[in-house]
Image (spheres, rainbow, N blue to C red):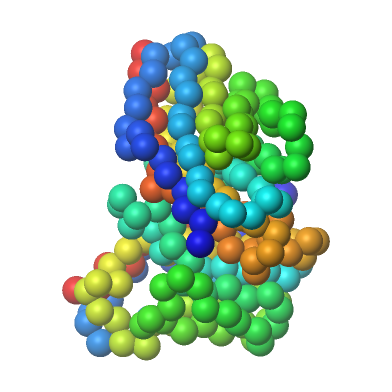
Amino acid sequence: DVKVTQSSRYLVKRTGEKVFLECVQDMDHENMFWYRQDPGLGLRLIYFSYDVKMKEKGDIPEGYSVSREKKERFSLILESASTNQTSMYLCASSAPGGRGTDTQYFGPGTRLTVL
Amino acid sequence: AQTVTQSQPEMSVQEAETVTLSCTYDTSENNYYLFWYKQPPSRQMILVIRQEAYKQQNATENRFSVNFQKAAKSFSLKISDSQLGDTAMYFCAFIYTGTASKLTFGTGTRLQVTL
């Protein structure tokens, strides 16, 4: 079974802090994704990566950056956390196969609160 | 750009009954995939079912089946013999082969299964 893990289930940070959210997958997937989930808005893509050291912006990249130094790990970085970044963050991964068609497998999510 | 609409924010069904969740989407593309994901209170997003647009036959997974109407751009999920464990948020999602694996999600339907 595919396993996607996220470093924290709950996280509380203060405004202006630098925040790192870590995601690790164990199935040698090339594609990894970071989503933000907010009530009434569904899931929105922040960033994704096709390979090590590669990244592409999603629909709402502002205020975020990412790092993919190893294939299995994809980090989401909030350079200076703000209260409007309080949300649920979901990581996902998918196998290479044909682009745009592969099932994405999700981690358990990190609920981030910025005070 | 494609959009996914789930017009039922909340639904309720009694145990052992059948319920149908609605999803419509808007795209000008011809080759794409559609998914239903389930997110129980534990927050882990789980794939329920997947449909390739080029297949006319509706996908089925045990008690879960879809009614895919390509011309109408409709993709509803039917849950038969509902169980308490089906209580969850259900998200409809779309991806087309021309993009970089970008899933577009609907806003979700919260399903409550009652005794």
Residue at x 62%, y 45% (from the top left corner): B34
Can residue B75 be seen by looking at this rendering?
Answer: no
Residue at x 55%, y 17% (from the top left corner): B80
On screen, residue B8 above or below A3:
above
- Closer to the camera in the image, B114 or B102: B102
On screen, residue A21 above or below B25:
below
Badge count: 0
On screen, residue B8 above or below B27:
above
Can residue B41 be seen by looking at this rendering?
Answer: yes
Where is residue B43? Give x, y as percent: 44, 48
Residue at x 64%, y 66% (from the top left corner): B99
Where is residue B26? Give x, y as percent: 51, 49
Where is residue A30? Give x, y as percent: 73, 70
Where is residue A53? Give x, y as percent: 66, 87
Q: Is residue A25 left or right of residue B84?
A: right
Q: Quadrant of residue B7?
A: top left
Q: Quadrant of residue B66?
A: top right
On screen, residue A31 above or below B65:
below
In the picture, the quarter occupied by the C terminus of chain A is bottom left
Q: Residue furthest right?
A: A97
Residue at x 50%, y 73% (from the top left corner): A58
- Closer to the camera in the image, A26 or B103: B103
- Closer to the camera in the image, B38 or A6: B38
